[in-house]
Image (spheres, coloured by chain):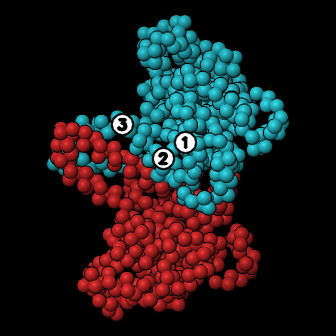
Chain colours: A red, B cyan
Amino acid sequence: MGGDHGPHVTVPAVVNYLNRNPEASIVLVGLPDVIESELQALKFAPTHRLKVHAASEVVGMDESPALALRGKKNSSMRVALDLVKSGEAQACVSAGNTGALIATSRFVLKTLPGIDRPALAVVLPTIRGHTYVLDLGANVDCSAEHLLQFGVMGATLVSTVENKDRPSVGLLNIGEEEIKGNEVVKRAAELLRESGLNFYGNIEGNDIYKGTTDVVVCDGFVGNVALKTSEGVAQMLSTYLREEFKRNLLTKFAGLVALPVIKAFKRRVDHRRYNGASLLGLRGIVIKSHGSADSHAFRFAIMRAVDEVRGGMLGHMSARVAQLPHHLNPSSQLPPIGEENPL
Amino acid sequence: MGGDHGPHVTVPAVVNYLNRNPEASIVLVGLPDVIESELQALKFAPTHRLKVHAASEVVGMDESPALALRGKKNSSMRVALDLVKSGEAQACVSAGNTGALIATSRFVLKTLPGIDRPALAVVLPTIRGHTYVLDLGANVDCSAEHLLQFGVMGATLVSTVENKDRPSVGLLNIGEEEIKGNEVVKRAAELLRESGLNFYGNIEGNDIYKGTTDVVVCDGFVGNVALKTSEGVAQMLSTYLREEFKRNLLTKFAGLVALPVIKAFKRRVDHRRYNGASLLGLRGIVIKSHGSADSHAFRFAIMRAVDEVRGGMLGHMSARVAQLPHHLNPSSQLPPIGEENPL
């Protein structure tokens, strides 16, 4: 129900996905009337592969996460996460209010033992391929221990969905030298170095798009600024390019000749292919689609959820975070190192 | 002497600048032999407008700032800053080691009363024009009070060199709402709101390149990541575009036709025009050129220094920071608000 466009985008994406993937089945959670009228418009009726599950409320995009969590116990978001918890669904995909999705996921599904806070990981294109960056805004005041947890979670995600044995992990910093950075990042580098991960060391902002490492670890504030700044640069450059091609008759002609190239370029940088951020560290798979996603983009978020389910991400993640040294988890209620691990 | 290319870049830039600006005069500080051989290669002899001032040492690009400050009392950087302190020069421009330049500037020139730490401000292009962002890496663990000081310094810089009466100031955050962000940023927003500046409020990463505000305030860690990430995106997009135009004979032909447009586009985004970061908050004007700057780019750093001198930046800055509430300056030794201001 969520996102800027609601079922008008999510329902066509689901139908499109089911048409392409005959083995998949999806449960649409929300106001039945609205969902069914979207399905009718597409001439698609609910089947065993496409069920509609009623939820009587919708979390607004600007609603306070705390109020949504407390006040809307029958929201589409909450009901969808309940289905994941009960095992009726294997993953939840939402384009809704990010803060509410994080808070509700955490409340309903709980974090894995050893994980203090869930983190949002996105895939970004690089010169060589793509890279996974986390956290993207779920956590704005991170400790070094949180950054270590992000490293472990990011590496587990990549090894699961990309079949990479030992993905490289970089720590986003303002210089490659070990002495650089703020105190939290310096300490995080020490922890990552001792973690057994394939830790590359410090990387800088430009390394994200160079594809220097498979995983980029940063606190949510820095990650969110880096992502939005990237969007801003790309928008500015594309505006400039468009303006230059529209300058006069001659440049318009050049634009016409170059059109297939520009189109190929645009396909390559189409951010919709990267839609779907993984909310990691929970006892369930949750994918956050961009609120402004269209149905093409939303389908990519569904595909990401399926990839994580198929790869057995949850099992890998539980096993991997269970190996985290407990004394490093600031909120951990677990016994100290050496004692029995409850997982 | 500093930068990746040393006098081979800086000397031609200076000669070029002097040829274009007959009223200017410049002092070249460094190893006289090296400088003079560069001048000879350009068939340019020292005059009253171009003096050579000897310094016997050079700070290495990877040298520790603390060691450079303590150990190299006759470095080109130190001697140039001494000339600014003594009034023989009105500004110092350096492409050298950033950390050493900041540490040495702070030691030699001292910060203005009311300013705790100098900040690095850069100009970045936007869809509408350009914007000033600070801090860019001089300060990695900032308090809310530091962010307030950055806002005041950035606004003073813009009003001086751009002749803008009340430049708008945005606070880089991860959402526009007041409740968003980490604790330091939330507190900084309160301080900026009470500061008398034309405070726009929170902005996000993409607002930098939208040109939403004249000044963007952020801590040095975030600013540095945002800047380097921007460089990374731009490099990746230009690599993609080049690859698409080189794909086959047809696309190569399209590239040939579109060449004038691509060239106009490249001129427009040429980062060399934005070279030269202002080190603000000192009792002297210091400009940091990018270490990899070529002579075209270095000339822009010189122009920036001249603009600040001509605009009377130092006077404006002293007057403006003197109005900062003293209790907000964590390291301030000044009397509390209401008492005589020693400036």
Label for residue B212?
Answer: 2
- Mark 2 and mark 1 in contact? Answer it, CB < 8 Å: yes
Chain under disc 3: B
Which quadrant holds the N terminus of chain B? Answer: top right
The tag earlier along the polypeptide, 1 or 3, is: 1
Chain of the residue under the numbered disc 1 shown in the image: B
Q: Is residue B14 left or right of residue B335?
A: left
Whether residue A161 is situated above or below residue A76 in the rendered picture: above
Q: Up-down: is B308 above or below B123?
A: above
Kind of residue sitting beneath label 1: Ser
Q: Position of residue A133 (x, y in %)?
A: 50, 61
- Are callouts 2 and 1 both on one chain? yes
Q: Nearer the viewer, residue A174 or A38?
A: A38
Residue A319 appears in the picture as rendered: no
| Viewer-proximal residue among A111 and B192 | B192
SS category of the residue bearing label 1: strand
Q: Which mark is residue B168?
A: 1
Q: Residue furthest bottom?
A: A48
Measured in 3D between alpha carbons, the distance from the residue under mark 2 to the one under mark 1, in whole angstroms, is: 9 Å
Residue under numbered circle 3: B268
- Residue at 58% across / 42% down in the picture? B198
The first of marks 2 and 3 along the sequence is 2
Which of the two discs, 2 and 1, labels the residue nearer the N terminus? 1
Q: How many neighbours does mark 3 have within 10 angstroms: few (below 14), some (14-19), or many (20 or more)?
A: some
Q: Nearer the viewer, residue A195 or B340?
A: B340
- Name the chain letter of the residue that bears numbered label 2: B
